[in-house]
Image (cartoon, helix red, strand yellow):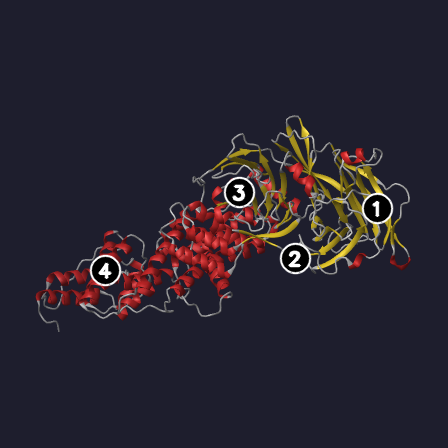
Amino acid sequence: MAAASAPTEPVQGWGGAPAAGAESGGAGARGGRYAASPDTSENSSALYVVNVERNGKVIYTWKGNQRNTHIGLYDLQTKQNEHLYMFERDLRIISCSVNNERTLLAVSFHQYTEEERVSRLLQSVSRYLALLIEIHPINNVRVLKAVDSCVRVQFLYPNEGRNTPTGSRLLLVSEDKYIEQFDIHVIEEEQHRVVIQDSGQLPRVRVADDLIWAQWDMMEQRLFYIVPKESRSILKCIQFYPDENFYSTLESHLDISVNDTQLKLVNFGYHYCQDQDVASKSLNLQVFTSKAGGLCVCCNLASDIPDEIRYCIYFLHRGYNKTFTVSLERTETHQLKEVAFMNLDYYVAAYLPGQFLHLLNIQHPDLLCYSLFLTGEDARIDMLQNCLIRSPLKSTVLDCNVGRMYAVSISDSAVLRFLQNSKRDSERLAALHCALLYFQHMEDLEMQVIWWISENLSTCHSFDPIQEFIIASLYCRMCPETQDLDKLLPYTSLLDWMGIIPGVTCVTDIISIPVLEFQHSKGFWEKLNSNLECVKYAEPHLHYHNNVLRKEWLNLSEEREERRTTAYLRHIFENAKKVLAHLDTWDSEERLVPLFQEEDYQQQLLMGLMVAQLKDHLMRHLQYVGKQKIDQIVLDYVANLLNLVHRIMKEVWRRHQLHSCIFCFDERGSAAEFAVFHFMGRILEAASGLCLPLPPGFHTLHLGLGVRCLPLHTLLHYIDNGVLHLTETCVRKLLKDLDDTEKNEKLKFSIVMRLPEALGQKVHQFWNHPVNANFIARKYVKLLLEKLGSGQCSRPIPERLSVPVEFLPLNYLTSVLAEIENQGVHPYEKQDHVNVRFVEETALRHTVMLLGLKYS
């Protein structure tokens, strides 16, 4: 599912000789005054990553032929190497950092072990050194620390594109559980030589004390650290700003008991032997952030059961944590039981090589069905087969065992393959959301997902894949438009999930909300604060729901015709017209599927109502955006919804190789048409379940396919149960195009008998047949007599006829109807030929036909 690849040429060669030219830039570098014991345990040509800077440049080290220690810099963008410095001794580099201008290099290294120092009678020599070196050009070397406790160094970086040639700031982290900041001022001498200005001690300030764990976020220049407090731990964060200030921005209580006496550091350089030793007996904890304001703390927990792994993810931006317990299928004694965590931005990955890969959804962690739990070959990440892994950058991991860095990404082809092969609904849901939301609107992947949906409608029992596709795709398309829109639009059709993941148990606990204090309101801290505000006040009620929409639509659909001219309804239909006009500007090509070619009162009513109600919902929570922007968002949302349904139809249409027009009723439908008809029924079911509008013409197309594909009794059953909707376009074409054979007469009459009154008045005229005329006459008489019975007209007193009476009952009826007409009552005003004379002729014709006589 996930793939690890070497993102750069030298990374592919790390473990072998350095890239060509790596040493050429360092000719004349000197550092021989710092003696160190030879390290014969490592390959003399091995390269190791020791740091990754904010600008993405990688600092690495290797041993030369004479056991010299070289430090190089690799640019991930230009794929160029630069030699920074060379020590003429074999040193154990612990950490290394170069400033943004590449004029200063900070290095900390291990001189001697305690045993070596005693054996060489060097008790007065410090075990660890931290140096500050001028490298533009190579010049003076200054000792920052000479101590017996391990120290690490890290330069601070300004914002991208902003240089500070007059100075740099350097963090120094001590194993004695404190962090301090050095202010280093430089001056430029002749020939562009850059040297440190201060001749005495460098100014310094204490940043943090008493910490037991710390992590450096080089991209965002943040320091996360933990201090113990009684039986709990407090996570804090310090944000470093370009103006050379730093502030404590976050404080959060973690229910983690930490008894470590040794300081654990993350992303402060990578000292492989020491990291492996510390990892085996120290707290395995990492903090990850996402661009959407997500903040997660990932922690490995101890377990007393041999074949069991426990880890906890604190979703601080959502106010809860989830503790997972995984029962391992197979274990080997030599395998580490330490979960490695990786930051993939939208996901946090918990990885145990050879066992499982758990991709936890950061943005929507509520339901487990949106997180992927993979085992077997699906969980295999090539080239990452051990657990000592760090994630210095998003979608990047460093294998600390071998000192190599890899780009890690989720494979879209693997996700699609997993979706196609999955047997559980939870796996299908997670893969479906990953394909739609993680990869974000990839045309080919969307097409493959639609094809999968069309083939697997009956295999998904706990969710509707069409509903999930529409809602998730809409969410993906719309949320980038405006900040906080992701909290207001639905991302799923599910309200809860009761499924389980075999072999995995999950316990959710509510935690205290982090306390934020930030100086600058833009960026990550603003988004995190917005997420926390949602948790505090209104999260369950923020996402748009269709409950009110359905009720209002049903009420308006049942309104009588004369009440449909109110100002409110005019406004609703104006909304629908704007949506359709907006949609026309997107797609000027001829549509493969015959949709959007007619008016549909019911669907336009639903469109307009959705526009009105969604607009009201957004106005309550996004007032700062402005009415004009919200109007545009709402139009985009409903238009995208209709376009998605059309996209689904288009892909299914292509898959079954149907023509652009199928409205020909003189032959039966093919197997492909029947498959499309069945799929349209599922689209209709999905839309009805969520009260979503369908493109105008959908019901006409569905009915047309039904007439071609279904036997009459099944067709009528579908109509009577609301699966098929009678539309004017389809009924008119059916009445006009089909000849009046006995079979077609039966079909036409069955359809005519089921037409709503308003629609019947529009289409009856297109079938010139005695049966239809008889039906119209009966209907006309019924309506006139209902007017008489309701008191809307006075009862007429028939006059004596001056002509001889040949059929008294009919004469009496026609005279009564004529009097009613004379009082201004005419139900069929738009059809002038339907009157008393029409009733009389139809009655006589029908009577003659019943008697078997010839009508003249």
As helix, strand or loop, the secondary structure at mark 2 comes to loop
Nearest to viewer (mark 3 / mark 2): 2
Q: Nearer the viewer, residue 591 or 411?
A: 411
Label located before the other in sequence (1 or 3): 1
Amino acid at the residue labelled 4? Leu
What secondary structure is marked by label 3? loop
Please indicate, yes or no, whether residue 244 appears anywhere in the rendered image.
no
Q: Residues within 10 Å of mark 4 (few under 14, many from 20)?
A: some
Mark 4 and mark 1 lie on one chain; the one further toward the N terminus is 1
The CA distance from mark 3 to mark 2 is 33 Å
Q: Which residue is mark 1?
A: 184
Sequence order check, earlier mark of 4 and 3: 3
Mark 3 and 2 residues: CB-CB less than 8 Å, in contact?
no
Instruction: Indicate the amino acid at tag 1.
Output: Ile
Give the residue pinned by disc 2.
8
Q: Earlier in the sequence, mark 3 or mark 2?
A: 2
In-image side of 511 versus 71 (left or right) = left
Q: Nearer the viewer, mark 2 or mark 4?
A: 2
Nearest to the eye among marks 4 and 3: give it. Answer: 3
Q: Which residue is mark 3?
A: 365
Marks 4 and 1, how far apart at CA:
88 Å
Q: CA distance from mark 2 to mark 1?
A: 33 Å
Q: Determine the residue positioned at 33% across, 61% down.
A: 727
